[in-house]
Amino acid sequence: MKKVLQEAYTYAKQWMGQGKVADYIPELAKADPNHLSICITDLGGYTHCIGDSKIHFTIQSIAKIIILATALKSVGFEEVFSRVGMEPTGDSFNSIVRLETMHSYKPFNPMINAGAISVTSCIPGKSPGERFEKILYNARLLLGNQELTYDEHVFYSESKTGGRNRALAYMMNDGKVLLGNVEEHLEVYFKACSLRVTCEEISYFGAILANNGISPRTGKMIIEPFQVKVIRSLMTTCGMYDASGEFAICVGIPSKSGVGGGIMGAVPNRMGIGVYSPALDAKGNSYCGIKAMEFLSHALELSIF
Ligand code: GLU
């Protein structure tokens, strides 16, 4: 494992300098584009790492999985999927175009921003704080860190500048898909995206999904197997934005990426993978991260297809 991680790291590092750190959330622009780490958590619960594996970054869209898991636990499959679809879009993660042109304001899937905001609105609670606590509770279990919290600077930075997400949310509210207080839903969503994680932690998260919802460290079930099936299916079809098709062919691992530069992969019954490198390609996926995943997939024959 050590050897293959070293090889994947050396291979991915060749693309260092390509891509760009996200700056549409101003605080994210501070990330160092030269960071790279790759971690694998095996189903014995052991995590193997190389590179900057203890650097903290914000989880961003990988939180969409935690939001979905929390909503599925809270209100169940039927209710969640009455508010969001299950189909890939082929559009970028924050695209607004289909909300209007499909003559229904129901977003296509939980892995795009509109869909994740809609799923967030399903999580019940008396206040945004109480609703976020439910997400945080699951995040701490899924990332194996009881101290996990969110990055206030990134949260405020996105709250101040999140015009596109506000537009999506108010449009869904106008279409009666997103009910209740729009600003409160956005607060919960932005906080979830700002969770502070490490590459090691996201590989452990991947290992729980790879292990059908059971923690490989504690043996406890964190997510029910049916919900894991739903989540892994959506990761495969929609997890890498509008590059999900190409990623399925070139890598073939159910994965979710975030604009913070992380990618979490779950290889069913084999392992969880975390990669982190904040410079992104044109579609918003970590440039070196994708290269590392490609290498690992070929070297260890990880494609599910
Ligand atoms: N917080 C980010 C947003 O809503 C997440 C996007 C992403 O990682 O794809 O724009």
Image: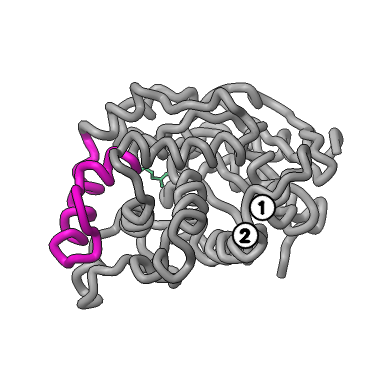
Left or right of 189 on screen, residue 7:
right
- Residue shown at 22%/53% (left/top)? 169
Magenta region, residue range? 161-189
> Label 1, on which residue?
209
Looking at the image, tell me whether mark 1 or mark 2 is earlier in sequence order: 1
- The residue that mark 2 highlights is 228
Looking at the image, residue 196 lies above or below residue 227: above
x, y (%) of residue 21?
42, 33
Image-based side of 138 in relation to 242, left or right: right
**Residue 190 position within the rendered picture, expressed as x and y whole percent measured from the top left:** 33, 38
Task: Evaluate if marks 1 and 2 touch, with contact meaning CB atoms under 8 Å apart.
Answer: yes
Residue 18 visible (yes or no): yes
Chief secondary structure of the magenta portion: helix
Q: Camera-side residue: 70 or 203?
A: 70
User: In the image, is residue 168 part of the stretch drawn in magenta?
Assistant: yes
Residue 48 at what x, y percent from top left?
Answer: 78, 33
Q: Nearer the viewer, residue 278 or 20?
A: 278
* Residue at position x 76%, y 39% in the image: 218
Q: Amino acid at mark 1?
A: Leu
Amino acid identity at mark 2 = Val
